[in-house]
Amino acid sequence: MVVRVAAVIAVLALIGGSIFFVKMSQTKGPDTAGIHQPVEGGANSKLSFDLEDTVPKIDFESIPDIIAEIDGKPLPKDDYVKELKVFQEMVKKNNQPIGQEHTQQIMDQILTKIVDGHVLLEKAKKEGITVDPADAASSLEKMRAGFGDEARFKDFMDSRGFTEESLMNEMKKGMQIRALLDQDVVGKVAVTEGDAMQFYNGNPEKFESKERVHASHILAMANNPQDAEQDKTAKAKAEAILKKLKGGADFAETAKAESDDKGSGANGGDLGFFAQADMVPEFGEKAFSMNPGELSDLVKTQFGYHIILVHEKKVAGKIPFEEVRDNIIQRLKTSKSNDAIFDYINALYVEMAVKVIDKDKQLAAIKPKVKAPAGHDMPM
């Protein structure tokens, strides 16, 4: 029996652009890392776990050639085997052993994800949903750009066994599924302002806020602040920028052009509201000691030299409903959509008489999945 654990997580991966999990683990530049405080921190084939090499051993030969039947059509094991091998490589790369029970849970989730994906794709085809190749090509280029450089993009494809053509095909499938769910499920989910207000009033602890500051910054980054030459160069750059600002240069335009924090720089250096503890100590202490409209001198942190402009300060207390209304509505809609997608997939399993291999490797009809506990305890 396949167990759907947090089933909708798999579906969200599907509608994100691929029938497989497409997770980009690229290492990017500073973005807003230059200020934020680091955070510390199914198919029961035979398997065993070797702690020496941290890779779960899976007996692929014991997996039946057909892992499911959807609307009378057999589903070969190819996708399942491919994803299990990717899972093995991920465990090996992370070098963190996981227990056999957890391994089996992941295997079951992978199987469920794959079957769910094919069920949804079959439904999309029945409803005549197609994808414009130009849209798929555009999505592929956005994904490529997200990796920062071509080498990391190719490493990702190699690690998942993709060519550009096969990745494009998977993205088309994911887009078909997303269109299906938008049409049949998500587009029918409605959340009113009254719903949001009810959630706001019923969860007061979620909307208690510490003192917050709204500020922008410009960073002159030193990749290694302990290197005297790098530190000197970063400081000289920051001093030149500060001189321009004191001479009347526009802060936002200067941040876009010269800040080494490219994430906030694209927004004119705007960091939005933040609590003091969200930032590295030197930055947080300075920002919270300033008055609205005030421009700082150079502030040195482990990332280099910052220039801070404070826009607004808010005292600790309950965040007004108006400030969080849109966020609550979006989160409630996401939660309701997840529940609706779960029910939709359950109905499709019945409609298409879906069978999936059980622990004895026999195709068996699937009973309706049990929904996880209510997902309305949402972090805000």
Image (cartoon, rainbow, N blue to C red):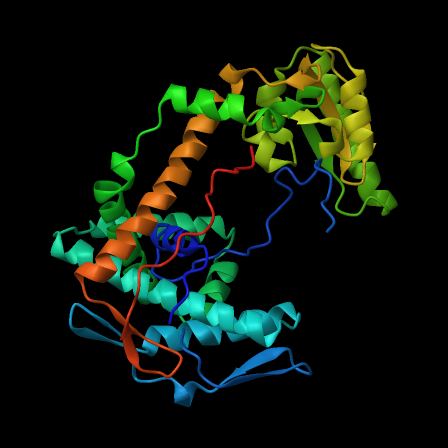
Left or right: 248 in relation to 43: right
- Quarter holding residue 166: bottom left
Q: If the image is split into quadrants, where does the C terminus sit?
A: top right
In the image, what residue occupies the spot 51% across and 54% down? 149
Estimate the x, y position of residue 37 in percent, counting from the top left.
73, 39
Residue 158 seen? no
- At 57% from the left edge and 21% from the top edge, which residue is drawn? 253
Dividing the picture into quadrants, the one containing residue 311 is: top right
Front residue of 233/34: it is 34
Q: Is 65 left, or right, of 94 in this rendering? A: left
| Count of numbered circles in the view | 0
Instruction: Return the x and y of residue 328 as percentages of the image width and height.
Output: 47, 28
Q: Residue at x 43, y 58 (%)?
A: 22
Q: Is residue 268 above or below residue 99?
A: above
In this view, the residue farthest toward the bottom is 61
- The image shows residue 48 at horizontal and vertical percentages of 57, 84
Left or right relative to 257: residue 274:
right
Q: Nearer the viewer, residue 78 or 34?
A: 78
Give the vertical position of 179 relative to 315 (above or below).
Answer: below
| Quadrant containing the N terminus in the rendered view | bottom left
